[in-house]
Every structure is written in C-alpha cells, then in structure tokens.
Amino acid sequence: MPPVAPELISPRSPRVSAARRLARRNFRGKERLFLAEGPQAVREAAGHRGDAGSTLVELFATVEAAERYADIVGQCRAAGARVHLADEQVIEDISTTVTPQGLVGVCRFLDTPFEEILAARPRLVAVLANVRDPGNAGTVLRCADAAGAEAVVLTDASVDLYNPKAVRASVGSLFHLPVAVGVPVERAVAGLKAAGVRILAADGAGSDDLDDELDQGTMGGPTAWVFGNEAWGLPEETRALADAVVRVPIHGKAESLNLATAAAVCLYASARAQRASGGCRSVTES
C-alpha cells in the first residue's frame, strides 16, 4: 500500500493562510474562530457542541499525527469537521508552539452570555479581573474546571480568552465549563450578588484569612472568587465591591503565591466547604 501523501503542502494555500491569521486577535474577532493545538485540545473540541453545532470546524494534521491519533481524527470527522492532511511545514506555519504536535483545530467561539451564567444559579465561579497574562488565564480556567466550578468570567480588561497561549494553558478545560468574556467587573459583581452569590476578593493583603473562613464555616454557600492582575493585584475600588477580602496564609518564608497557585488554593477551599455542607457534589461521583 503506497504511503499517504499530504494534500496541503504550501503555506500559501488559502486554507492555510486563513488558519494562520487566527493567531491574531483582530482576525479571531472578525471570523469568530480560534485555534486549538495538540491532541488533548482537539479531542475536547471535537466533543463540544454549541448553539451553532459542532465547535470544531476544521482540522489540520500531519500524516504521522493522523496515524498516531487516528481515534481523534475519527472523532473530528464524526463531528463534521473538515480534515486536511498537511505537510509538516504547513503545520509549523499555522502553529504558535515551538514544537507542534501535528494537530491544529479551527474552532468556533464558545463564550457564554453572562446572563445565561447567572440564570443557571452557579455555586462556584472564578472572576478574572484585569488578568493580562494568557498563560495565567488559561491555568486559572483549568483550576476552576478541576475544582468543579460552574463558570468563569473574564472582565473587559482581561486577556483574550482565545489567545493561543490561554487555550493551550487551559489543557482542554476551555471546552468544559461556561466562560463569559468582556464583562465589566462592577457588572459581574452586581449580577452575581443579585443571584445570591457571595463575593470573595483574593488578595495577599486581605483582612480575612482563608483558614479562618474555613474554620468559621462561612464558605459553604454559593461563592465567586475575584482574582486580580498578576503584578498589582486588585485595585481598592474592586476590593470594596467584595463581601470579604481574603488572603491565603503563608506559613513558610515565601514572599507570595503566584496567581494560578492562589486561585487553585481558593477554589479548592470553596469546593471542599461546599461538599462538606452538602451543597456541591464531587465531580468524581457518578
């Protein structure tokens, strides 16, 4: 049986050029499409459906990757995505990683209107206020997913959800839970409060201690954690909107925790408190 040859061998192909442009935010916004790279992200995209149908609309794969990940390519075809076998140079041209894994998907935007998140009466939410680093944003989204949060909200001053680094850092979690984007922080807080959600601002200089909150049993109800900018944290006007400003205690000599680590600690603390109060089922239960 003769070897399979790639159908796309030129980076100048119109299909390749269209995909390559999605690395730029203005083109993503215009087309309402973004790139998902690697087997994990492509697998999750193939299994996700939105209001417009399948989220994954197109897949570029090297011949070697198509053979290695034949099950994923089959899922993509079953989801209705167009599958293109491409030369390795073509994949490198589309990819935004240093060492591409041979699979690059083109996906429809999937953010959720903030009103829909409120209507679902979420019990655990992560709000990213002025978070500018895409790696941190994607990692916090992954932490929120792992902790069983029902939604993530990115404020209007935060990084683009579909930045390739953010998508990669989420490791597929982008496709697991509702994410609202472009919401002013004042509107996010007011809407969540009106929905009966307690607002906790995470800040290293907070007046309340996370351990004390847990000991006092105040964290079992619906909660939204507001996480601030990596460099300067939360401004005073944002902290003033919260029901409490909470610090993660530092028991050793570390100066502080980075954003993603602090977010993981806070979200898991809430998840544990909610399960203990019978209000939140563990995602590992059937």
Image: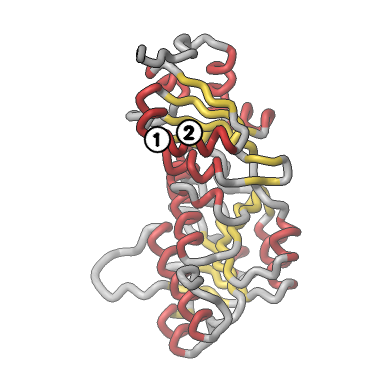
Residue plotted at (38% across, 19% down)? 88
Q: CA distance from mark 1 to mark 2?
A: 6 Å
* Mark 2 closeness class: few <14, some 14–19, many ≥20 residues within 10 Å: many
Which image quarter: residue 120?
Answer: bottom right
Residue plotted at (55% across, 82% down)? 220
Q: Is residue 267 above or below residue 135?
A: below
> Residue 272: horizontal and vertical position, in percent?
46, 78
Q: Is residue 17 above or below residue 181?
A: above
Look at label 1 and name its amino acid.
Tyr
| Furthest residue in direction front, as rendered | 1
Name the residue tied to disc 2: 73
Taking depth in this image into account, of 257 and 163 the one nearest to the observer is: 163
> Residue 259: horizontal and vertical position, in percent?
42, 58
Name the residue tied to disc 1: 69
Secondary structure at badge 1 equals loop
> Residue 131: horizontal and vertical position, in percent?
52, 51
Residue 259 is left or right of residue 194, and the answer is left
* Mark 1 closeness class: few <14, some 14–19, many ≥20 residues within 10 Å: some
Is there a contact, CB below 8 Å, between mark 1 and mark 2?
yes
> Residue 133: horizontal and vertical position, in percent?
47, 45
Q: Which mark is residue 33?
A: none
| Furthest residue in direction left, as rendered | 253
Residue 254 is left or right of residue 275, and the answer is left
| Furthest residue in direction bottom, as rendered | 216
Secondary structure at badge 2 equals helix
Residue plotted at (43% across, 43% down)? 40
Q: Is residue 236 above or below residue 159?
A: below
Q: Name the image quarter holding the N terminus.
A: top left
Q: Is residue 76 above or below residue 182?
A: above
Look at label 2 and name its amino acid.
Val
